Image (spheres, helix red, strand yellow):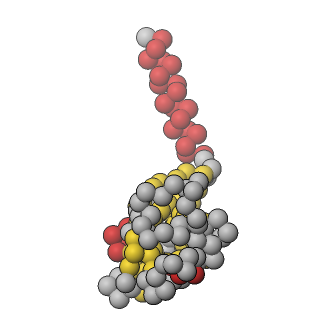
Amino acid sequence: MAFRAIFVAIVCLLVSAKAVSPTLVRGIRILGHVFCTVDNIAVDPLHTPTFPNATVVLQCGSENTTIVSARTNNAGAFHILLDPSISVASSIESDCRLVVTTPLANCNAALSPTRTLSSELLFLLTLIGDVVFDTYVPRRFMLKG
């Protein structure tokens, strides 16, 4: 009987705490790294050179409409924050892709001067404090074009 009373008290406490906690804010973020290679599947991040100052764009739909762009930092990392009210928010994973529009030759002259990298997106959910982020990362950058 004591166990039941303690259980009920804990459930009531959790329900009341949730009732007074702030509303969770949703956000959309896309983050990742771009490496200077034609196939990012077997990348050793300690030994594969990164692709600094590359432009990464989020393209959606059959017409490849650019929604937003970002530039990689010196470590090849990029971070995009989106307003969850944008029209493509519900279909980012199925209808959008990341494209590195900067030619690969910009990071290595031996690579193609005309071909670029492209990747589908993988969904992850992240909770930071009271903010829930729909987080997307590149599945795998591959040669395009």
Q: Nearer the viewer, residue 33 or 96?
A: 33
Task: Locate residue 73 relative to residue 85 in the image: left or right.
Answer: right
Residue drawn 53% across the image and 70% down it: 36
Task: Locate residue 53 relative to residue 8 in the image: left or right.
Answer: right
Total count of labels: 0
Q: Position of residue 106 (x, y in %)?
A: 57, 81
Task: Using the rendered view, name the quadrant where residue 96 is placed.
Answer: bottom left
Q: Nearer the viewer, residue 18 or 99?
A: 99
The C terminus, quarter of image: bottom left
Residue drawn 60% across the image and 46% down it: 20
Q: Position of residue 4 (x, y in %)?
A: 44, 17
Tell me, yes or no, if residue 2 can be seen here: yes
Instruction: Name the residue at the front extreme.
Output: 110
Instruction: Name the residue at the right extreme.
Output: 74
Residue drawn 48% across the image and 11% down it: 2
| In the image, residue 83 above or below residue 7 | below
Q: Position of residue 102 (x, y in %)?
A: 53, 82
Q: Nearer the viewer, residue 132 or 62?
A: 62
Residue drawn 57% across the image and 56% down it: 47
| In the image, residue 40 above or below residue 117 | above
Q: Position of residue 55 (x, y in %)?
A: 56, 80
